[in-house]
Structure formats: C-alpha cells, structure tokens
Image (cartoon, rainbow, N blue to C red):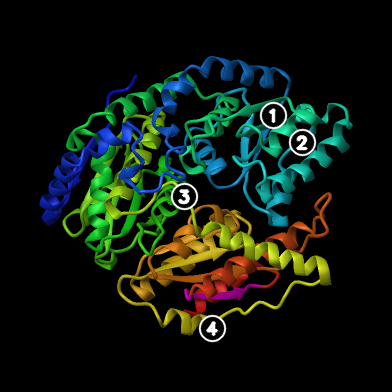
Amino acid sequence: MAEVTRTVEELGRYDTLVESTLARLDREKVVARMWQGDYRVWSDDPTEIEDRLGWLTIPEKMAGTASALSTFASQVQRAGFTNVVLLGMGGSSLGPEVIRRTLGSSPGFPQLRVLDSTLPAWIQATEAAIDPARTIFLVSSKSGTTIESTTLCSHFRQRVTDAVGEGPAGGNFVAITDPSTPLEALGKSEGFRQVFLNHPEIGGRYSVLSYFGMVPAALIGLDLADFLARASAMQASCSVAQAAANPGARLGAIMGSMALEGRDKLTLVTSPALAGFGLWVEQLLAESLGKSGKGIIPVAGEPELPPGQYSNDRLIVYLRLRGDDNAATDTLTESLSGKHPTVQLELCDRTDLGAEFYRWEFATAVAGHILGVHPFDQPNVQGAKDKTDLVLEQFTATGRLPTIRTGEAMESLLGKAEAGDYLAILAYLPDDEEVCRALAQLRLRLTEKLGIPTTTGFGPRYLHSTGQLHKGGPGSGIFLQLTADHPLEMPIPGRPYTFGTLADAQSAGDLQALQELGRRAARVHLGADPTAGIQRLTASL
C-alpha cells in the first residue's frame, strides 16, 4: 500500500478562522456523532439522513466483495467481450467515468464507455465505436426508473437482439440497482447476466465505492483489493474524532469556512492525469450543498488565466499526482497561493483515487453541517424532471413540442454579471473533441470579459449533477443554455417520441424551471453545426 497522501495548506489570514471552526466541530462532537448516525448533525428531521449514511463504512464492506467481482470480470473477459457501455446518470455514471479517465483498462480487459446522454449524436457515436454482440451493457440506476437509463436500455436491447437473437441477448446486460426496483425485476425477467443489488442506504452521489463504481471498475481490470484498501485507510483516518487530525473533517472545515466568508467558488486545479476528477466533485458538492439559497460552487476544468484575473471569491484546491507532468499546474498554484487560500492534496499514485473519493465525501458531509444544509437530499432536481414530463405529455397529445421562451438576448444576459456571480454554460451538445475545444475557447473569452468564474456542463448529464445547485443554491448564477439541431433521429422502443425529442424536452424543462425560479437564464440555438455556432458566439464577444 502507498504511503498516506500529503496535504499542504496556505490559508493566509483565514488560518485563525479555520482553526476556530475545527475547535467548534470538536466542541459539538460532530465527527463522533456522524459515526454514531446522529441525523441531528444536519437536521431535526431524519428523512433521507438516517437511511443515507451507508457510505461511511462501504469501503470495508466492499473489500469483502473484491474477489467475487474480480472473478465475475474474468468471466466476462473470457467470454470475449471487448467493450462495456455504462448506461446511467449522475451518481451512477460520474464516478465510473473518473475511474475510466484516470486509471483506464488493464491489458486484455474491455474498454469502458459511459453513455449519460439522450442526444442522438452522442448515442450514435457510442454505437459506431462498439460491436453490440461483444459488448456488455451495464444498466445503472438506484431507483431503477431513471428515464435516460431505461430508454437507453430499451434501445440497446433491440440492437443486441438484432445482432445475436432474442434468446441470448440478456447475457449482454448487467444491472446495478437497489433491492426491489423495476430494474431488478427487468434484469431477472429478461435474463441479464447478473443483477447487483446495492446497499440501499447510500445516495447516488456517495455511491462510487459501492457496486455502482466497483462493478465497472472490476470489468476494466482494476485491482479492487488495493483500490478499496486505500479507501479503507482513508475511512480509518476519517474516524478520528479530533477534527484537526481528521483529513476529511479538516477539508470540510476549510470548504465550509471559506464559503461563509464569501469564498464559495471552490476552484479545482489538477495534475493532467487527474483532470476527470472534477466531473465527480462537481456533482458531489453541487448536489449536496446547493440548496436553501446556500452552497459551494465547484469550478472544474477552467481554462488557465493570468493570476490577476482570478476573482476574490475563490478557494483553490490543487489535486496533485506525484510524478505527473506538474510543471504548469505547480506554477499556477504557486502564483495563486499568496492571493487566495490554497489547499494542495498530493496523491502518491493513481490508485490513491480511492482514498480521495472517500475524503471528499466525508468533507462534503462536514461542510453541510457548517453551512446548515442537508447534504443527502436533492429537493430541486425533481422540478426539472416534472417540467420535462409536462413537455413530453404535450408532445404526445399534439405531436409538437411547446414553444419555449428563450429568454433575453445573450448580450443583455451577460450585462447583468456582477462581482460574486458565476456563469454556467449548459451545453445540450455532443461531447466530442471539436465541441469541447470550441466550448473551452468560449469559456475563456467569457471569463476574461466578465471577470467571474465559469463552469461548463453537458446536458442532460448536469441535470443529475449541478442542476440542484443552479436551482436551489445562491442566486449568483447566470445560465447560458446552448442547443443544436439533431441531424439524426432515433426512435425509442415503446415510446411515442424519439431521443431527439426527449433531449429537447429535457432542455426545455430545465430552462423553464430556471426561469420560474427567477434565475438569469437564456438559450442560444446553434443550428445544424454546433462547433461553428460556438465559434460565432465566441467571435461576437
């Protein structure tokens, strides 16, 4: 096992504040009460707390399954499968995506692709990269009813049936869900290769170290015993009652203290090999803490700026991988550490990712206590889903999508930016290299022009991630939604609408929810060529 990760803090004038917060955590016995399952750490109401603390001990519990999961993965490998496509959203998909990007597949094991989109272009790109007959489709949903997962499962079930026949098709599917869900019943009735029933007392965004993360990790050949041992070591460290000596509680105290002081834009800087970590952290922080008008705004993957252009509402957290090409990120964080509170967390190797998952989960729960928010529910996520359902109902009844109020012009929207705000680019676009490069240039130009932090999220992925923060968090967000045409339409088996219609309904429902909450939001439709459309927007600035 690698040595314990190293932490360096440069908090400047905030040192005293953080030490005071740590002392208060000790006086209130917050860490000990968390481990005792005391829901009153966060709320007087136990709802979605008493039955959401299973993540605290999941590394140790999952360690006992490592051998069986590795055996299952070897069986899949020997059966000749070359790809695993994960069909899931939010907590079911973002952790596995980080594992895929950071650790990759071991030699001889299948390649993992995460499909967390309803956009036809995104689905088509996945289909073009795989052979359905030699692909395992991993259907992941805690509730077993997530619309993206269920529609994608129906679509690919038809593709596999066309390739191998109705009888054997179930052997290409694996389900991960809670007990007694519709997905469990589907997996059993349609002969899925395996149905993994997860520990139900874990919420989606805290589930990466459960079956939701460890099954896909096993299928790509990750050494689960080592990975979970790192997480278990961090679990042990986070059981220390004294907050100052507890790595999770200490990070949580820093995050919460900084947010209360107005430094609520947690800006994540990472070594190149750890760049994907931001996807998971965005959901964890945004969905856990962005509610009741409060929150911490995660800023991940931001284009590098001159040191003087970083706004004064930031906390810098540098996730550094020892031995990586760190010259640029070291220089950046050194230039920022004298001007902004900075925390550096150093990983000895990539397998320490397991420990970091746990540290950040614990820190987020502690920060929830400090901010006075419930870190395990998501009260505003359902609103956008309900709006989507209404749009789909109207389409089913009339054959047309309703007319959407797109909001004010982009120039007017951007003119409302003030110090302390952030801009979120909400891109209902395919996640391909050209689009990503164009979005990075747009984001850089907007950051320079407005002088505020920016974020980027692909829809509908972000609806299960930062969407909670957008609607329930501080009113400091400005939201620029980008949409495009669907050159290809794809029917959904058993549904009266296509994937393109579903994606459009989701973007419409999200925009309506933002507008009804009085958020500053507008839509720009980019037409048939999203890359060219983004480039035009950038040039107009």
Q: Is residue 369 left or right of residue 185?
A: left
The magenta stretch spans which residues?
Answer: 518-526
Residue kind at label 3, given as amino acid type: Asp
The alpha-carbon separation of the residues under discs 1 and 3 comes to 37 Å
Nearer the observer: mark 4 or 1; the answer is 4
Q: Which mark is residue 408?
A: 4
Residue kind at label 1, given as amino acid type: Thr
The alpha-carbon separation of the residues under discs 4 and 1 comes to 48 Å
Does the segment drawn in magenta span residue 525?
yes
| Residue 419, above or below 383 | below
The reply to whether discs 4 and 2 touch (Cβ–Cβ < 8 Å) is: no
| Residue 74, above or below 421 | above
Which badge, 4 or 2, is on the more N-terminal residue? 2
Nearer the observer: mark 1 or 3; the answer is 3
Which badge, 2 or 1, is on the more N-terminal residue? 1
Q: Which mark is residue 377?
A: 3
Nearer the observer: mark 4 or 2; the answer is 4
Location of residue 404 in the rendering, given as x and y in whole percent from the top left corner? 66, 77
